[in-house]
Structure formats: C-alpha cells, structure tokens
Image (cartoon, coloured by chain):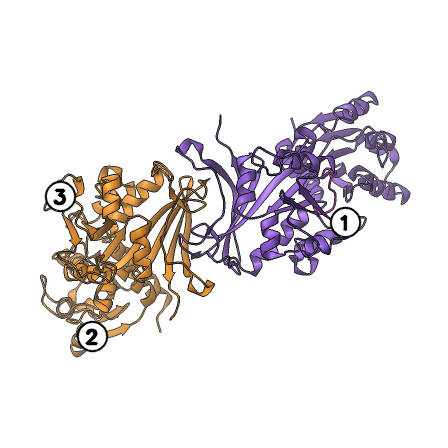
Chain colours: A orange, B purple
C-alpha cells in the first residue's frame, strides 16, 4: 500500500527523470526524491551516461543540509528515498547507488520498478534489504516503464525502440506525383520534429530519401523548441550529443557527395548499412532485423525513422515500428500524389495494422497523432 | 449596440431555430423569443415548410398569457421580439409575420439578419418600421448565417450547399484493393452518418457505388442517434421526410434491380441524372453544375455526398463541395488500398485544396473532422 504522499513524491521523481530525456541514452531515465517529515530534503536526476546517478545528486543535497547543521544525520533513519528505477548494485562508471543510500543511513526506499538490466535485476533491492533498509517496489510502475521504453527495449528485446514519423495531407499523401513536398506541414510541426530527433539515439532513413532530399537529419538546436533548450539547461552535468545518422543503402548507391555522408564527423556520425556489412533478405535488401541487432550492439536504444513509403512500409511489415507519429496537414492532394506507406496488398480487413492513439494535439495548424502500433496476429 | 441580455435572447432564438434542422427544408431555420421586463413570455421555432412560422408560435404563447389574464395586451408595447431572420412580409403558405407582430402590438423587434429571399429582402423590416415598431438588425448575424447556410446557398448562389463525407483509414484509404471496406469506421461513426443524412434534403451518389454496394442511402430512424429522435419530438407540428436519393449515372448503366431504384417510393424517392436528362461535360459525363442547378430547381437546398473517389473528386474539381466531413479510423491499410479522392495530377503545391477544420471530435474510436473547403485561386 502506498499513500497519496508516496504517489506525489514518485510523480515528482518521474518528472525529474524525464529531464534527462535528451542526454542519458543509452542509460535509463532515473529521478530520485528524498523526504523527511513530509518535506523534500534532496532530489535530482541522472543527467548523462558516465556521470552521477540520480540518487547521488539527491544525497548530495541532503549532505549540504547536514553540513549546514539544518539536519542531523541520525534523522535520516526516518527518511524515505523515492527512486523511479531500482538502485544499482554494481560498480560501472560510477559506484553502486544501493551502497550510497545505505551509507547515508536512509531508512526506507520506495522504487517504481525493478531494473531488468542483468547486472542489477533485484540485486540492488537485496543489498538494501540485507542492510536493514525498508524497501517497497511497484509504485507508478506503468508510468516508469513508459518513460523508459527506449532503455527497456534494448534490455528486454535486444533491439532499439522504433518510432516512425509521417507528415501527410489529410488524404494521406506525403508529396505530389513529381516529388514536391515542400511544404505540407508548417514550421511549428517541423520544429516539433527537432524535439523528437533530439530524444532519440539514432535517426534512420533510406538511400532514396538521401538521393531525393540530401538531408542533414541532425538536431539543429537553433531551430529547436524553447522547452528543449530549457531542459538541457536543467542538466548542467550533461552535454547534448548528436544522434547517430543511419542509412539503409542496400545497393551501395550512396557516396560522399551527399552531405549526410560527406559532412559526417566524429561528433555528428553517420553509419551506412549496405550489402557489405549487413545480412540481406530474400529480396536482396538489408535485413531490417539485422540492422536493429547491429544498432543494439552499438548501444542504440532508440531509433527515429524519417523515410519514404518504402522503408517505413518495410519496417511496418517486419513489425519493427513500435510507435508512429503522424503530422497531418489540413489539405487534400488527391490520388495521384505519393502515398505514405508501402505495404503488401491486403486481401482481408483482419490484415490491417491498428493504431492505438495515445495523444492528439494541434502543432500550429497541423494535427499530430501519437500512436502505438498493433500488428495483426498470425 | 446590443446588451448582454439581447445576446442571450438571440442565442436562445438560434438554439430554437436549430431544432428545425431535420424538418424545415427548403425553408430557413427560424427561432423567435419574445421578452417583457426581462422575462420570456413566448418562444418557438419554425418546424416545417407550409406550417406556422416561428413568430406565430411565439405569439401564440403570448396570447395564452393574455387570455389567462397574466398579461395586459397594452404591456406588449414594451415587449421585444428576437427573431433569427427578418420576419416575412409576403403571404406564402402562411400569412406575413411582420403583420402578426404589428397586430400583436410588439414594441420592438431585434433581427439577426435580413432575409435575402427576393420576396422579403428588407420589406419585412420596412413594414415593421412603417407601423412604428422599433427595429434593430445584425445581432449574431454570423451565427445566423452559419445555421442557414443551406437556405442561403440556394437563395444567394442558386445551388444547394454541398457536404461530402469520407470514411478513411489514417493513411487515407477507403477500401482494400479488392474493394472490401467493411468495416473501416465503426458503428458510432455510421450512426453519426444517419444524423447527417437526416439534416440534408438530398443524398447524392454515383453509379459505381450503387453497383458495388447496392445501398439504400435512406435515413433509418431506428439506427439514428437518440438526440435526433428527441429533436424530432420537439417539433410536434412537423413530420420527417426521407431525403431525395440522387444518382449520377452518366452512361445509363443502372436499372431497377438495384434497390435504390427498384424500391423507390413517393415518400422515399430516387432521381437518376443521366445522359438523357442532364447536360454532358466534354468528358461525356453529367455536368455537375447542371446537376446542382436541377436540384436547386427542385427546391433542394442541401446535398450530402456519399460516393467513391471518382465522384467526390469530380465535385471537388468542379469546386462544388462546400464542406467535407472526414471520419478517420485508427488503422493503416497501405498504398495498395483504394484512395479517397481522385483529382487531376497536381504539379505545384499551390494547386492543393486547403481545408479549414471547424470541428474535430471522437465518434467512438474514430476521429471526425468537419472542414470548410478552400479552393486554390486562379
């Protein structure tokens, strides 16, 4: 049983955790709130892989109060730490957080969810309990799983979480028959795309998009929404890094004349999947499951897809798209215009791909739907 | 200048007017509220063409109060009648309402908009003023024009107001490649369609839809939403009649084996536009402007289009669709599935048809957008 106060404090810890969404990958998002007598005495979030964990930031605030004499260390036996993910028990690039909580003398720890990462997986909880700390698990677990869907995908499924983006007219078209697509959606929607690019470890596209648009597919912080910049400022320990650009070029048609390849740098890298470095499917194209496996091996936990109907359709057909974001512009382009998604011809309605719309909002004059993708069975 | 009370009373009159939406065509929707000393002493709405006008219903309520001795007729010099459309000055199937208001001794009349119908067109206002009634015009005129867009279309443009309906997947498809379309949208959306059919004087479709679906395209009150039935019950003087079914059959391919023709009756009529009775365009198909002119001559003020991509596209190309209603089901069907709208191939983004979305809501699990159609210039 958790109290209303417990729920409020874990909500706060989840809110803090999300502040790391642009900088923690491939680590999980974690927030920590430490309370005593109904007051918050310390809080913080994990800001970047390799830097201090959330619990360490929160305990540092508690230490400040102890140093100032505003708090006695013995009082911490009555303190409670709310953490959105099981405290770690292993020494990675930082020391184990379970040990830090024990050493600080925190009397109780409430955890949203156990960490499925094999080096933790219950050992943090066991270590706390062995030291006499009272531990409760499962408060707002569903919410914690949602914010960490990228991290959980790579740990639990050994592949990245994949979100595909579409920008269409209200009749489902992404470009005129002659290829003209500038502009269907307007500037606010394209600015919103900058936010999504920044939330992902990798941006995936196909060779046809590179040839047609010669895009940069990087995050342009100057074009980003203000809240992205504000969130980065709340993580002083962290530094934003550009997502990996990945291109499917099954037939090795691309070269350095395209800026996504020619202008790639160590801090803004590009990886090209082609027949040389990737398993091929029966159709002679890069096997998309192998692409995802290779990305997982590179510690890529999330992929943002901006591509044409062919690659988006192939990813959907391979049941690799977890989430779809559709920007719809209020216009009609007619049947001669280009479709958004190439799928094999459906012969029965049971073969349809269903969408569970989790959010709908206006972005400027365009509509944005966020959808979980539900594949047909069998 | 109109007071807050004036606005509230005209809003009430507009609300009453809309109660006639299923039964007044081809007449305008009209509501009337009569007040004295801040109280409503009579109100009513036009319920059906050929029956009493709104002012007559409202004055009858006032008369009841006079008969009961609750009101002195002399007091009516201080009464105000709020009417959503200029009171008529001519004798049609009923006597002139301007005369009725004068005879009742109503001291002031506030009118939302002048009636553009040529037999009125300011004469009602002139008659009231000549009799010493104080008249003000223009309160909530924009709102009054919206509820009477069907009536105004036929009076001002000599053609019906045309609303086309689409039911698509989120990627813009209306059926699988093999024609299967049952079901993309679910029962609540289809029930909502019954409401729209009932609001229109005519349901228009094409020969291909008749051949493919053999639809009835009538209003099935048993399948209608409860509020439609409740609204009809608030108009005891009126009787609901089925919309005219109209079919474009340019090549005379239909016959009585289709139920929309074979089962037509005087109370549920069907009219077929074909090469025999309709002007043909250069492409050998029925000229859609001539179709609309003929419908206007039959006193059809509103057309609800349920048709395939060909006819919907042709109506859009002829710039005859005023409003579009799109039901979108949360699913993907892919590029092999059938498109919603056949248009000539666009070569520049300036040729797009823009949509001004006036309403978006969920109907069960489907999305419904209501849009004004904005055609490219030139």
Q: Is residue A374 left or right of residue B243?
A: left
> Mark 3 or mark 2, which is nearer the start of the sequence?
2
Q: Nearer the viewer, mark 2 or mark 1?
A: 1
Of A210 and A155, which appears nearest the observer? A210
Q: Where does the image place residue A45, in percent across and percent down from the top left?
A: 21, 56
Q: How many numbered badges does the structure rendering display?
A: 3
**Chain designation of label 2:** A
**Chain designation of label 1:** B
Provide the residue designation for mark 1.
B235
Q: Where does the image place residue B262, in percent across and percent down from the top left?
A: 72, 55
Q: How far apart are the two marked residues, 2 and 3, measured between alpha carbons?
A: 41 Å
Mark 2: secondary structure = loop
Residue A311 visible here: yes
Q: Residue at left 34%, top 64%?
A: A7
Q: Is residue A369 left or right of residue B210?
A: left
Of A124 and B143, which appears nearest the observer? B143
Marks 2 & 3 on one chain: yes
A234 w.r.t. B188: above or below: above
Q: Is residue A161 left or right of residue A186?
A: left
Magenta region: which residues? B21-28
Q: Quadrant of residue B230?
A: bottom right
Of B28 and A81, which appears nearest the observer? B28
Was residue B27 drawn as part of the magenta stretch in this picture?
Answer: yes
Provide the residue designation for mark 3.
A264
Q: How far apart are the two marked residues, 2 and 1, measured between alpha carbons?
A: 69 Å
Provide the residue designation for mark 2.
A122
Q: How far apart are the two marked residues, 3 and 1, measured between alpha carbons?
A: 72 Å
Was residue A369 drawn as part of the magenta stretch in this picture?
Answer: no
């Amino acid at each position: 049983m958790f109290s209303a106060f417990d729920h409020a404090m874990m909500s706060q810890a989840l809110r803090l955790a999300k502040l790391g969404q642009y900088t923690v990958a491939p680590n999980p998002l974690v927030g920590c709130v430490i309370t005593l007598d109904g007051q918050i005495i310390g809080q913080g979030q994990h800001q970047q892989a390799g830097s201090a964990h959330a619990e360490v930031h929160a305990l540092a605030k508690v230490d400040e109060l102890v140093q100032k004499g505003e708090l006695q260390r013995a009082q911490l036996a009555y303190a409670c730490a709310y953490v959105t993910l099981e405290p770690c028990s292993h020494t990675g690039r930082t020391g184990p957080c379970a040990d830090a909580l024990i050493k600080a003398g925190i009397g109780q720890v409430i955890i949203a969810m156990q960490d499925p990462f094999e080096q933790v997986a219950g050992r943090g909880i066991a270590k706390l309990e062995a030291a006499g700390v009272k531990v409760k698990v499962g408060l707002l677990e569903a919410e914690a799983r949602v914010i960490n869907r990228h991290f959980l995908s790579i740990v639990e499924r050994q592949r990245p979480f994949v979100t595909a983006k579409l920008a269409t007219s209200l009749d489902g078209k992404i470009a005129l028959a002659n290829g003209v697509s500038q502009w269907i959606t307007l500037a606010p929607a394209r600015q919103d795309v900058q936010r999504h690019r920044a939330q992902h470890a990798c941006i995936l596209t196909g060779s046809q998009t590179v040839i047609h648009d010669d895009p940069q597919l990087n995050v342009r912080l100057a074009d980003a929404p203000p809240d992205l910049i504000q969130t980065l400022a709340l993580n002083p320990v962290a530094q934003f890094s550009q997502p990996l650009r990945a291109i499917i070029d099954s037939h090795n048609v691309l070269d350095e004349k395209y800026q996504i390849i020619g202008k790639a740098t160590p801090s803004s890298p590009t990886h090209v999947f082609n027949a040389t470095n990737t398993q091929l499917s029966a159709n002679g194209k890069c096997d998309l499951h192998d692409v995802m496996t290779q990305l997982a091996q590179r510690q890529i936990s999330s992929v943002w897809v901006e591509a044409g109907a062919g690659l988006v359709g192939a990813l959907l057909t391979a049941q690799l798209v977890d989430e779809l974001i559709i920007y719809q512009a209020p216009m009609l382009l007619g049947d001669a215009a280009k479709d958004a998604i190439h799928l094999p011809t459906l012969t029965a309605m049971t073969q349809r791909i269903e969408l569970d719309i989790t959010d709908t909002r206006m972005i400027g004059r365009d509509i944005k739907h966020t959808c979980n993708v539900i594949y047909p069975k069998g």
